[in-house]
Image (cartoon, helix red, strand yellow):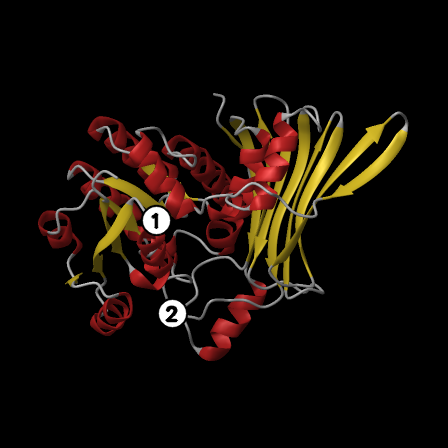
Amino acid sequence: MSKKLRMGVIGLRMGKNHAKAYQTHPGSELVAICDMDKDLLAATGDELGVEKRYTDAAKMMKDAKLDAVSIATPNRFHAPLSIAALEAGLHVLCEKPMAMNAAEAEKMNKAALKAKRNLMINFSYRFSEMSYALKDQVDRGAVGDIYFGRTVWHRRRGIPGFGGAFTNKDLAGGGPLIDLGVHRLDLALWLMGYPEPIAVSGSTYDPIARAKADAAGATYTVEDLAAGIVKFANGATLIVEASWALNIEEREHMVTLLCGTKGGLVQKNTGGGYNFVAELYTDEGGNQFTKRLDWSTEPVPSSYHEFVDSIIAKRPPMATGEQGIKVMKILDGIYESAATGREVRYDR
């Protein structure tokens, strides 16, 4: 085998899974890790057996002789660190969301194109056997042309603490929409073939989280619920919903439902947890069938392994910067529409 790719990870609270995955791919090795939290850095380095440890990302990029790096920091730092890595000649796997907004995302993608390096976004929910199976059915024409969908991630109570990076708009860019909704949004768009958004309407709310934050004397500057309607150039419509706190039955409610001219499909969680089912709904000879996926025999790479594979094969990754920009445009549109009370249009 040719020389292994030398990988680094910046941000270990979210990046530990990245680091572990690079150690399990036969074509990569984990060379360096970086985090400003010295205790976390030391504990992770000891656990994974990594000698090169940094608290300064720029120094790691300069000194560790890397081929690629994962950016798994708070959202505010995704764009500047990704651009710095790309300009240093490194391939980049950036955690979701791609950036704080679409303008930053576009700068990241331009840097990747200029550097001729791969920029992949960690849209991990498409990297599962059932997601691949549903995509295969769509590509085979089982659902026909998709014209309507709804993609959701709600939590009954799941606010990720007050005062941290997730609930601070200056660090996160938003709340559950940019944290949870981004996963379900990408999954729906990927299954739909990533159509071009032309108009977005949205609303955001924070009554539950706001009351809890006020009672605790804590800072909370993001929404606890967001909902939006997205219209695409091909005529399709998608409803997007995400919340950290909503008065519903389940602890966690995740569903992506897409309806087409020949059939429909769904991926949803069961029992309020992280077990999922995938179903296909068809009309065959005047009879309606519901087909559930039992299992898939084809192995599916993790997003981390796909990143490594794409570099080795010298091809674009599956989750591209261009796709990340479309996601950010939709997220921006929902937030802007919620703030202004008006539809945001991109076809002007």
**Residue 3 relative to residue 136: left or right:** left
Q: Where, by quadrant of the figure, is residue 98 drawn?
A: top left
> Could you give the CA–CA distance between mark 1 and mark 2, rounded to whole angstroms?
37 Å
**Residue 227 relative to residue 329: left or right:** right
- For label 2, the crowd category at 10 Å Cα-Cα, with few meaning under 14, some 14 to 19 and many 20 or more, is few
Q: Amino acid at mark 1?
A: His
Question: Which residue: 80% across, 41% down?
Answer: 290
Against 268, is 238 above or below? Answer: above
Against 6, is 32 above or below? Answer: below
Q: Nearer the viewer, residue 341 or 205?
A: 205
- For label 1, the crowd category at 10 Å Cα-Cα, with few meaning under 14, some 14 to 19 and many 20 or more, is some
Question: First in sequence: mark 1 or mark 2?
Answer: 1
Kindly identify which residue carries mark 1.
25
Q: Position of residue 138 (x, y in %)?
A: 64, 30
Kindly identify which residue carries mark 2.
163
Question: Which residue: 68% across, 33% down?
Answer: 148
* Secondary structure type for disc 2: loop
Q: Position of residue 293 (x, y in %)?
A: 70, 45
Q: Amino acid at mark 2?
A: Gly
Question: Which residue: 38% across, 34% down?
Answer: 317
Q: Position of residue 73 (x, y in %)?
A: 31, 56
Which residue is farthest front?
Answer: 1
Q: Nearer the viewer, mark 1 or mark 2?
A: 1
* Secondary structure type for disc 1: loop
One can see residue 97 in this view:
no
Which quadrant does the N terminus fall into? top left
Q: Position of residue 149 (x, y in %)?
A: 66, 37
